[in-house]
Image: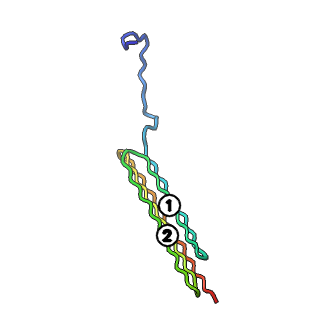
């Protein structure tokens, strides 16, 4: 089919339509206790120009007298689309210290 063969041509306006856009999401979870340390970080960005960064760190120190657990998580997301901008950040820390007799 050629465009010249069309019998009806309508003008379509997109003034009230959402095309594109930006969205960011971050989430962190941490837990520390009894020789256990867990960390989780999620980052998502949607748009024309995006960047994400997710970092986690865990440490456990144990000896016969004590137990120490540390968990840290951070998530950063940025998105840009024309003049629209979105940024999300989340951070979480958990610390546990158990003294044994």
Q: Residue at x 42, y 40 (%)?
A: 20
Question: Please, is residue 100 above or below residue 74 in the view?
Answer: below
**Dot 2 alpha-carbon crowd within 10 angstroms: few under 14, some 14 to 19, many 20 or more:** many
- Asked which quadrant contains residue 88, the reply is bottom left
Residue where numbered disc 1 is placed: 41
Furthest-bottom residue in this view: 101
Residue where numbered disc 2 is placed: 72
Question: Please, is residue 6 above or below residue 39 in the view?
Answer: above
Furthest-right residue in this view: 101
Task: Give the side of residue 5 with respect to residue 59, left or right.
Answer: left
Give the quadrant of the N terminus. Answer: top left
Coloration mode: rainbow
Q: Which mark is residue 49?
A: none
Q: Nearer the viewer, residue 29 or 99?
A: 99
Q: Nearer the viewer, residue 87 or 11?
A: 87
Task: Give the side of residue 74 with respect to residue 97, left or right.
Answer: left
Q: CA distance from mark 2 to mark 1?
A: 9 Å
Q: Nearer the viewer, residue 100 or 73?
A: 100
Q: Residue at x 44, y 60 (%)?
A: 54
Q: Residue at x 43, y 19 (%)?
A: 10
**Dot 1 alpha-carbon crowd within 10 angstroms: few under 14, some 14 to 19, many 20 or more:** many
- The reply to whether discs 2 and 1 touch (Cβ–Cβ < 8 Å) is no
- Asked which quadrant contains residue 11, the reply is top left
Instruction: Return the x and y of residue 12 as percentages of the image width and height.
Output: 43, 25
Instruction: Return the x and y of residue 31 as percentages of the image width and height.
Output: 57, 69
Instruction: Return the x and y of residue 25 as percentages of the image width and height.
Output: 49, 54
- As helix, strand or loop, the secondary structure at mark 2 comes to strand
Question: Please, is residue 49 above or below residue 39 in the view?
Answer: above
Give the quadrant of the C terminus. Answer: bottom right
Question: Please, is residue 28 above or below residue 60 in the view?
Answer: above
Q: Along the polypeptide, which appears first: circle 2 or circle 1?
A: 1
- As helix, strand or loop, the secondary structure at mark 1 comes to strand
């Amino acid at each position: 089919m050629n465009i010249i063969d069309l019998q009806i041509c309508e003008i379509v306006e997109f003034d009230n339509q959402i095309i594109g856009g930006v969205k960011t999401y971050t989430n962190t979870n941490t837990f520390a206790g009894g020789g256990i340390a867990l960390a989780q970080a999620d980052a998502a960005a949607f748009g024309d120009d995006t960047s994400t960064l997710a970092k986690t760190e865990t440490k456990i120190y144990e000896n016969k007298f004590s137990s120490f657990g540390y968990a840290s998580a951070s998530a950063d997301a940025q998105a840009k689309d024309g003049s629209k901008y979105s940024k999300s950040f989340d951070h979480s820390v958990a610390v546990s210290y158990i003294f044994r007799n």
